[in-house]
Amino acid sequence: MIRRASLVIVGALLGATAMSVIYSAGVPAQAAGPSTYRELSIFGDVFERVRAQYVTPPDEEKLVENAINGMLTSLDPHSSFMNAKDAEDMRTQTRGEFGGLGIEVTMENELVKVIAPIDDTPASKAGILAGDYISEIDGAPVRGLKLEEAVEKMRGGVNTPIKLTIIRQGADKPLDITVVRDIIAVRAVKSRVEGGDVGYVRVISFTEKTYDDLEKAIKKIKADVPADKLKGYVLDLRLNPGGLLDQAINVSDAFLERGEVVSTRGRNAEETRRFNAGPGDLTDGKPVIVLVNGGSASASEIVAGALQDLRRATVLGTRSFGKGSVQTIIPLGDAGALRLTTALYYTPSGKSIQGTGIQPDIKVEQPLPPELQGKVRAEGESSLRGHIQGAAETDEGSGSVAYVPPEAKDDLQLNYALDLFRGVKKDASFPPSPDKAAAATIKK
């Protein structure tokens, strides 16, 4: 098992984009021709006309930012300009920690509802409970705010206080609770033992903490279940939008003894990079089933594709998002950063999943509950306007419905995997044959 320090990251905004593969490095630019600079002078003339003559004085900074974004989004859905705040937010997400309170929240009835305080964080120590409603933040009402705006207000510098007004069921009046912010480490991996014989590991996102969290999770499962009783591992990558590429490589490597994990190929042949696994399988060769759905994008597709192509794991679920392009993050000093598509990535067999996604070995669809039917639809990279056409893309496209039931008993995909481990169900794809891995990689 070889861990890597890398400047490559995978991640973007979920929703209209999905996750991206990103290199955090500057790339020297070639000089444009004279005709290009003549066109740029037209832009300058238009900008001056708008600035001087528009009916109301425009925000000049916004004008320039929107013009840049217009240029980039005309290329593909994943190229964009990040201002200083957006760039810092991205760095915070990839670090997997921030200054805050330590609560999982949602929006309900125009108030912030606490889903749960995270153990051993300022929120739990201050006495905030699951089910509490936050009506005011530092005396300012929450009503009228979006959830993201409320969360932004609750984040802040370490050791700074914040006063929350809490509405609690059973309390006679609202409670004022002061919480002192601290470093909150976001859990990248959650795990448990299913039925005493199968290890369940859910990778939520690929941050700087993911491999370490995965290693701890596997160690705990091995400590809780004797080796002769442990039938294998479920690696749940559903609803995982991506994150750091080096962590995706390390997570893949955690289950592999050898083989190419992923390659990236740019405009020029010399830009091709290959990333290989090293000796050391944390799971001691136990069978693995990887769960994917339409919410599995980019970094999670790299892991699923590597374990599938190298016949280390059986992939179960529905077709993944299909995000297979590479973005380079080019710092622009105090102005922010440029995210620019520069390459595609390929699975060990040499296959690009751009616009196609990872096709599971065993297709198991998860039905939507009645209240979500007609409201949630299948989406993927291929449905994004202006996406890069994948070499193998067809009318079928990529993606599928991204839904996971909150209760494990209702999770058909997970329970199908458990039945395979226990022999209740059988499929030719499980366990996969390692002998076929060599043949698959030769095809490239």
Image (cartoon, rainbow, N blue to C red):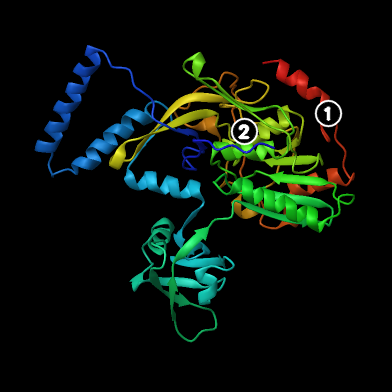
Where disc 1 sits, the SS reads: loop
The residue carrying mark 1 is 433
Q: Quadrant of the N terminus?
A: top right
Identity of the residue furthest to the left in this view: 52
Identify which residue is drawn at 68% across, 21% down.
Answer: 349
Label 2 neighbour load within 10 Å: few <14, some 14-19, many 20+: many
Does residue 61 appear to the left or right of 129 in the view shown? left
Q: Choose the circle earlier in sequence order: 1 or 2.
A: 2
Q: Measured along the vertical axis of the image, is residue 320 above or below residue 186?
A: above
The answer for how far apart the CA atoms under marks 1 and 2 are is 20 Å
Q: Measured along the vertical axis of the image, is residue 85 above or below residue 157?
A: above
Identity of the residue furthest to the bottom in this view: 172
Instruction: Give the percent coordinates (x, y) of residue 144.
Output: 36, 63
To which quarter of the image does residue 134 belong?
A: bottom left
In the image, 104 versus 247, the foreground residue is 247
Q: Amino acid at mark 1?
A: Ser
To which quarter of the image does residue 304 belong?
A: top right
Where disc 2 sits, the SS reads: helix
The residue carrying mark 2 is 302
Identify which residue is drawn at 55% across, 36% down.
Answer: 245
Instruction: Give the percent coordinates (x, y) of residue 255.
Output: 73, 38
Q: Amino acid at mark 2?
A: Ile
Contact? badges 1 and 2 (CB < 8 Å): no
Label 1 neighbour load within 10 Å: few <14, some 14-19, many 20+: some
Q: Measured along the vertical axis of the image, is residue 415 above or below residue 285?
A: below
Q: Measured along the vertical axis of the image, is residue 179 above or below residue 245?
A: below
What number is the disc on residue 152?
none
Residue 379 visible at all: no
Instruction: Give the percent coordinates (x, y) of residue 302.
Output: 62, 33
The mark tally for this picture is 2
